[in-house]
Amino acid sequence: MRSLFGTLPELFKSEDELRTIWSKPDTRKKLLEELTEKGFAKQQLTEFQKILNAENSDLYDVLAYIAFHSDILERATRADKAKIHLYNYDPKQQEFLNFVLSQYVKQGVDELDDTKIGDLLVLKYHAIADAKKELGDIAKIRNTFIGFQSYLYDKRVAI
């Protein structure tokens, strides 16, 4: 853990920068790849979660805690606080985002990867075509899925 503490400043300079990186699936994936290259594979990060009694928390919280001594929030708390932003979406999008949040709480941050959109749509709607009828085209669904994630890591969530 001590060596991770020394490595993190090479990857991000502030908690705001970490939050920005972690809020988007593509930059989050890149950060996790960089951590792996520096010797901190996902399994090691998961071990750090266990050591910190943070198995029900997001890896973001573990990294923020190690780097900046930030509070560790459980995924359920993070999801509940993000739900106040659902009013920005129409009722069908809200229903889908609530489903995504429930999967995130149960399974973890991997459920927020953009490669999971198809699986989540099939799980919720049983077919991509049915999901498109409810939510619009794939580009719109993807924008909703990715755009909403910033609310999970909003600074105000920790308050």
Image (tube, helix red, strand yellow):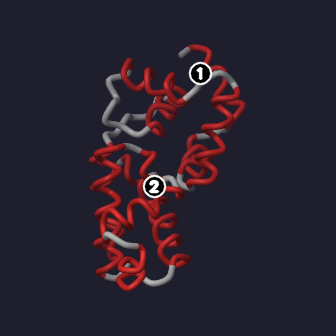
Instruction: Identify the residue at image location x=28%, y=45%.
Output: 106
- Quarter of image, res 32: top right
Looking at the image, how many numbered discs can be counted on the residues? 2
Q: Nearer the viewer, residue 21 or 107?
A: 107
Cα separation between marks 2 and 1: 23 Å
Q: What element carries label 1?
A: helix
Please state the horizontal and vertical placement of residue 62, each as a whole percent of the image: 45, 31
Residue 127: image location, x then y, percent = 37, 72
- Asked if residue 29 lies left or right of residue 73, the reply is right
Q: Which of marks 2 and 1 is nearer the N terminus?
A: 1
> In percent of the image, x 64 and y 40: which residue is there?
31
Tell whether 148 sits left or right of 73: right
The disc at residue 154 is 2
Viewer-nearest residue: 50 or 110: 110
- Estimate the x, y position of residue 96 in percent, counting from the top left: 33, 70
Q: Residue at x 43, y 21 (%)?
A: 47
Which SS class for mark 2?
A: loop
Q: Which mark is residue 105?
A: none
In the rendered image, the vertical position of residue 130 relative to residue 78, given as above or below:
below
Judge the density around disc 1: few (<14), some (14-19), many (≥20) Cα neighbours within 10 Å: some
**What's the residue type where badge 1 is placed?**
Phe
Q: What residue type is labelled 2?
A: Asp
Answer few, some or many: residues within 10 Å of disc 2's Cα (few below 14, many 20 plus, some between 14 and 19). some
Q: Pointer 1: what residue? A: 5
